[in-house]
Structure formats: C-alpha cells, structure tokens
Image (cartoon, helix red, strand yellow):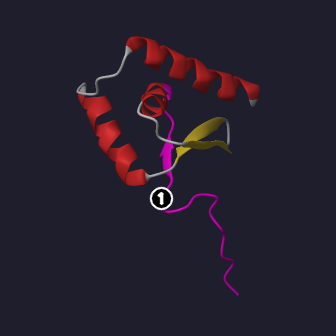
C-alpha cells in the first residue's frame, strides 16, 4: 500500500526563503500566512501565488518601488516573527 503524504501547503501558497523578498511581499500587502519549518530553516508562506510571483519578479529585477520606511517596518515584522520561533 502506497503512503500518501499530505503537504502543509496549498496550491495557492507562495513559499519564500529570502527575507528581503518576504519583506517586499509584506510591503505590497500580501497576506502572510505562517512560518513553516523545514530542517534548520524556515519558509515564509504567503497566500496568492500569482500575485506573489508578479511582485517577486519585480523585486529580483530591481523594478519594485516601495517606501524605504515601509520596507524597514516589514523587514522588522518578518524578523520578529522569525526570531520568535527560535
């Protein structure tokens, strides 16, 4: 009998390891769902994969425009959530 493992992620979830990318998604008001531990690191899990992919593409190409203050606040929020897990 084959064992079926249930994934903790939905098809609409967007998983990110990069803290800057995660902060940029928060800046654009994408809903942060949770941190998901995998071994020695955590995934930042957001909803709305399609929107996240569009924002992330702009982030990595250097085209994403956000307020420096808003980015700093989002980065602080992400770090607070991450370090609360340890």
Question: 68 above or below 82?
Answer: above
Residue 84 drawn at (x, y percent): 75, 26
User: Observer-nearest residue: 32 or 60?
Assistant: 32
Toward which corner of the image does residue 27 lie, by quadrant? top left
Question: 82 above or below 43?
Answer: above
Magenta segment, principal secondary structure? loop
Q: Is residue 34 visible?
A: yes
Left or right, 21 with reference to 58: right
Part of the protein shown in magenta? 1-19
Residue 71 drawn at (x, y percent): 45, 19
Residue 48 drawn in magenta: no
Residue 10 drawn at (x, y percent): 55, 61
Q: Is residue 86 visible?
A: no
**Disc 1: which residue:** 12
User: Observer-nearest residue: 19 or 40?
Assistant: 19
**Which residue corresponds to the image point at 69% horizontal and 78% vertical from the top-left?**
3
């Amino acid at each position: 009998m084959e064992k079926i493992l249930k994934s903790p992620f939905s098809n609409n979830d967007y998983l990110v390891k990069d803290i800057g990318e995660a902060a940029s998604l928060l800046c654009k008001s994408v809903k942060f769902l949770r941190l998901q531990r995998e071994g020695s690191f955590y995934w930042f899990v957001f909803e709305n994969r399609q929107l996240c992919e569009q924002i992330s593409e702009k982030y990595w190409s250097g085209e994403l425009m956000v307020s420096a203050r808003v980015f700093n606040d989002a980065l602080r929020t992400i770090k607070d959530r991450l370090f609360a897990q340890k």
